[in-house]
Image: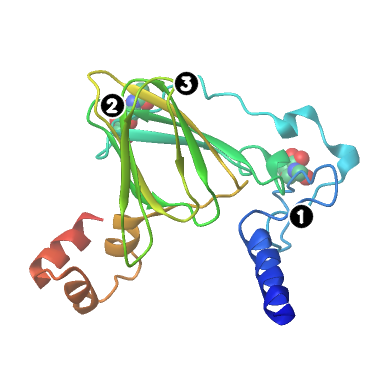
Amino acid sequence: MAASFLLLGLLAITFSVALADLSPLQDFCVGDKNSTVLVNGMPCKDPKLAQASDFFFSGLHIAGNTSNPVRSKVQAVTATQIPGLNTLGISIVRIDYAMGGINPPHTHPRATEILTVLEGSIEVGFVTSNPDNQQFTRVLQKGDVFVFPVGLIHFQRNVGHSNAVAIAALSSQNPGVITIANAVFGSKPDISSDILVKAFQLDKNVITYMQSKF
Ligand SMILES: *[C@@H]1O[C@H](CO)[C@@H](O)[C@H](O)[C@H]1NC(C)=O
Ligand SMILES: *[C@@H]1O[C@H](CO)[C@@H](O)[C@H](O)[C@H]1NC(C)=O
């Protein structure tokens, strides 16, 4: 009994560490983008040399260019854009959608996402893990907020009659993104078409065609 409680405690500690970026052990660690040291994140620049500009980004008022096949654009503001975000476990994005535009199915391996609609009408959804693969979906209006739990495949689509805009916060300074179609059909080198033929139960010609699209 005591042993199983101990095991549960250890599991809880393991998961609480695994589910969020690690807590910083200093006020901040402004990422030194010039460093060639390979660590989990960026090494800190000398805190005495930190400036307000290390914690600043300007541009989320600017609409993204949606002239692309999916008709949406994501402007990410992560530790890459704001080096002061390094180690802090948070970031933000602006997403613009032309009419009918989508943000294709993708996952963030390191972050939960909380999305707020600023303009327009957006259908959102995510799908749970195997074996259920249950879809949770909803149409959002201006001011509505929706959550995409860490790691789960999710998407958005502009279902209104005008452009749509959303802002989303993510629980990592470097959430990462895996766009499913690009990763599966556009990997370099290609995943063997024999594997994709069986995985998707499709004809080899269809797989070759899809691989040519990515
Ligand atoms: C990185 O290098 C550039 C150009 O050498 C320099 O201007 C900049 O201050 C450096 N950044 C840091 C964080 O040291
Ligand atoms: C938007 O992107 C398209 C495609 O890349 C490009 O042709 C066009 O010039 C861009 N428009 C603006 C305003 O930057």
Q: Position of residue 37 (x, y in %)?
A: 74, 62
For disc 1, the neighbor class at 10 Å (few under 14, some 14 to 19, many from 20) is some
Q: Is residue 156 visible?
A: no
Q: Position of residue 43 (x, y in %)?
A: 76, 55
- Measuring 55% from the left and 55% from the top, which residue is drawn there? 110
Residue 43 has which mark?
Answer: 1
Dot 1 or dot 2, earlier in sequence: 1
**Residues marked 3 and 1 touching at CB (< 8 Å):** no
Q: Is residue 43 above or below residue 2?
A: above
- Measuring 19% from the left and 79% from the top, which residue is drawn there? 194
Q: Is residue 97 above or below residue 191?
A: above
Left or right side of 30 for 184: left
- Measuring 59% from the left and 41% from the top, which residue is drawn there? 78
The Cα atoms of the two marked residues, 3 and 2, are separated by: 14 Å
For disc 3, the neighbor class at 10 Å (few under 14, some 14 to 19, many from 20) is few
Q: How many marks?
A: 3
**Residues marked 3 and 2 touching at CB (< 8 Å):** no
The Cα atoms of the two marked residues, 3 and 1, are separated by: 31 Å
Q: Nearest the camera: 98 or 43?
A: 98
Q: Is residue 94 visible?
A: yes
Residue 62 has which mark?
Answer: 3
Left or right side of 106 for 212: left
Q: Is residue 105 above or below residue 57?
A: below
Which corner quadrant of the figure contains ligand 1?
top right
Q: How is the image coloured?
A: rainbow
Q: Secondary structure at mark 1?
A: loop
Camera-near label (1 vs 2) is 2
Q: Which residue is mark 2?
A: 98
For disc 2, the neighbor class at 10 Å (few under 14, some 14 to 19, many from 20) is many
What amino acid is labelled 1 in the image? Pro
